[in-house]
Image: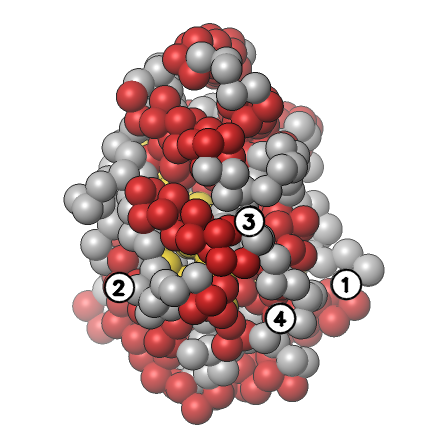
Amino acid sequence: MNLRTRVGFGAIVVGALAVSATGCAGGQQQPAIDPSASVTITVGDLPSTKAEAARKGFLDAVDQFEKANPNITIEPSETRWDNGSFSALVAGGTMPTVMGVPFTNTQQVIANGQVADLTDVVNQLGLLDRLNPDTLKPAQADGKTYGIPTTVDTVALMYNRDLFTKAGLDPDKPPTTWDEVRTAAKAITKATGNPGYLQITQEGQAGWIYTASVYSRGGSIENPAGDAVTIDDPASIAALQGLRDMFSTDKSMGSSVIMDLKTIMQEFAAGRAGMFVAPVASYEWLNNVYDMDLSVIGASHLPQGSSTPSGTPLGGTVQMTNPKSTPEQLLAAAKWVDFYYFGKFTSKDTAVANAQAVITDGGIVGLPGLSPLSADAYTQYREWIADDTNVDASHFTSYTDSLTKIPLIPEPATRAQEVYADLASTVQAVLTDPSTPIEPLVKDAASRIERIISQ
């Protein structure tokens, strides 16, 4: 699920280097697509006028790009992903040349023929060598590449280190399994009277976090192709049973059945909740919006069903292109994506300038996480910004150590956003009435999802 559609995280990075297409054999062989052809492209995701600073940064980047690439004219557009209108954009010919698509929808739009094949373009630019192969998978199908991931994320167990200490728990050894989460939650509630654990139960975010807990137990919601429902299995039942055990039996989740991420973060920032599962970038909101003492925050990986890791969902945004674009437009679009989204990874000056600008605005620099680029590129970037990093990496050890150990599993391939929204009722039902049998709830959810993906 796209991080921005969940919570509105939207850090805009402006690159300052031009990126030119690379030829073959030292430039002696002409590229398949002429990189010097005059072309006009429309780029989506221009921030609205309500976000003045972000909009200015975007437009400044357009100016810089056009100066460095005088043959390319960019027409910025505020058009951004909307699940209900995307098909109409494509059919009506108004889709921008390039725009962001959530990981949850990439396979669907590829299967529908609604985006262009970028294989030749990314090969000509040498992008495949610089991209993270694990995070590239949602943008690929049948050996072809249909997009360029620009933001990637996975979920984490966020926890309050102070409440851990008050409960006699070691804040440097956070829970790694759901059984350990239950034990820690009980201890926190007993020692402090606060909920030891809170979970999102409202709207699409509820289904997304529930899906994560299913993945972590070895289950799935759909098969990889997205043409069959697989939720009716022991992992899905165990995920709901775990919630019921904490909410109804242990009473370590408070008394509210309906909880959204905003409310959870408010409670967490106020020191009234021990743990919750959300994107690791929640750390930024806890700092920027709720002014929480960052020394109190810890992050571990998504708890797993056992000591043997099963998986964690991979989310983010992929830049995808209009299927009616010319090859020259596709090449220009990919060059823009490389310039705008990856500039800080390819230039030390840009990386440092961006980091210092964020610090000036009171933001977070150096938050651990996944990168859409290769491990080497990401390591180099972190070295460049080391002097400006304001995150205590020791509080993220469990999370960062997991990034290469816990399998990254793509989100449901077909209508994931709709599936997530539908699953909220299942999560709420298991908490509302502790006498309701869980297995029928899962079977009913499976039937509803069957109808959703068959549309």
Would you name the residue on which mark 3 appears? 195
Q: Amino acid at mark 2?
A: Asp
- Between disc 2 and disc 3, whose residue precedes? 3
Check disc 2 and report the residue beneath it.
Answer: 401
Q: Earlier in the sequence, mark 4 or mark 3?
A: 3
Which is nearer the N-term, disc 4 or disc 2?
4
**Callout 4: 10 Å neighbours few (<14), some, many (20+)?**
many
Nearest to N terminus: mark 1 or mark 3: 1
Q: At 74% across and 71% down in the image, what residue appears?
A: 53
Residue type highlighted by circle 4: Met
Provide the residue designation for mark 4: 292
In the image, is residue 368 above or below residue 262?
A: below
Question: Along the horizontal axis of the image, is 161 left or right of 375?
Answer: right
| Colour pattern | secondary structure
Asked whether 25 or 289 is in front, the reply is 289
Q: State whether residue 280 is above or below residue 343.
A: above
